[in-house]
Image: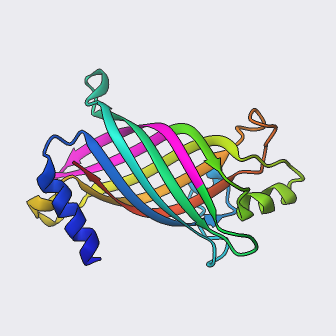
Amino acid sequence: MKLLLLLLLGLNLIAAQNNYSMRMAVGKPTLYSAADIATGSFGQYRDDLKAYNLDGGYLLKKDLFDWPIDLYLKGGLTYYEETIQDDIYGADLYIKAYYNIDFWKNRVRFGLGEGVSYTNRILEIEQIDAQLHNDNNSHYLNYLDVSLDFDLGKLIKYKALNETYVGVLLKHRSGIFGTIHNVKHGGSNYECIYVEKNF
């Protein structure tokens, strides 16, 4: 934890332009669909399956259309801890928009990202989902990145941690109802927590 705080403080001192972002996340898979999660159904599938994610981003446009929306190009690598097979590596490339809500001298962001995702093998949770629905799997799938976070530095009134966001994340891989490789149910949802720093 001390190393993480030191890294975040170091990034804060390197640059103050906030054109870049870095996110570290950890999460667990769920068998709930994205629609279930959006309506408040949460819960991990098993405790022994995990995902560790590192994402980097570049700010494409601040205040898009004069609205409080920041647009980023993002890419990330994910290490999936599996049990019935060797661990898996994945990569995501996506565009993400953050809608900024400022109140009480703080900032809350709702983020929505859309792109593509690749894993070097089929995830265990995706194999289970496909078997439950007699469906297909694919290494390449559509990727959604949905997040909600707040500015930790502004909350605790510690300027060195401004633009450091703590939040929750849904990493969603899917075939978009069969439009990608005929995958209708062989996708995955990982519920994550994360820390993200703009620098």
The answer to whether residue 38 of the structure is visible from this angle is: no
Which residue lies at the image location 65% right of the left edge and 68% below the top edge? 87
Vertical relation: 100 (above or below) 68 = below
Q: Where is residue 134? Give x, y as percent.
A: 90, 53
Where 106 sits versus 157, above or below?
above
- Image coordinates for residue 178, horizontal then vertical, percent: 78, 37
* Residue at position x 75%, y 46% in the image: 138
Q: Position of residue 123 (x, y in %)?
A: 70, 60
Q: Is residue 171 magenta?
A: no
**Horizontal arrangement in the rendering, residue 63 relative to residue 89 (left or right):** left
Q: Quadrant of the N terminus?
A: bottom left
Q: Which span is picked out in magenta?
A: 90-113
User: Residue, x 82% and y 37% (percent of image)?
Assistant: 182
Where residue 51 sits, quadrant-wise, is: bottom right
Residue at position x 55%, y 49% in the image: 91
Residue 181 position by quadrant: top right
Instruction: Please state which of residues 136 and 98 is positioned toward the viewer in this rendering.
Output: 136
Predominant SS along the magenta part: strand
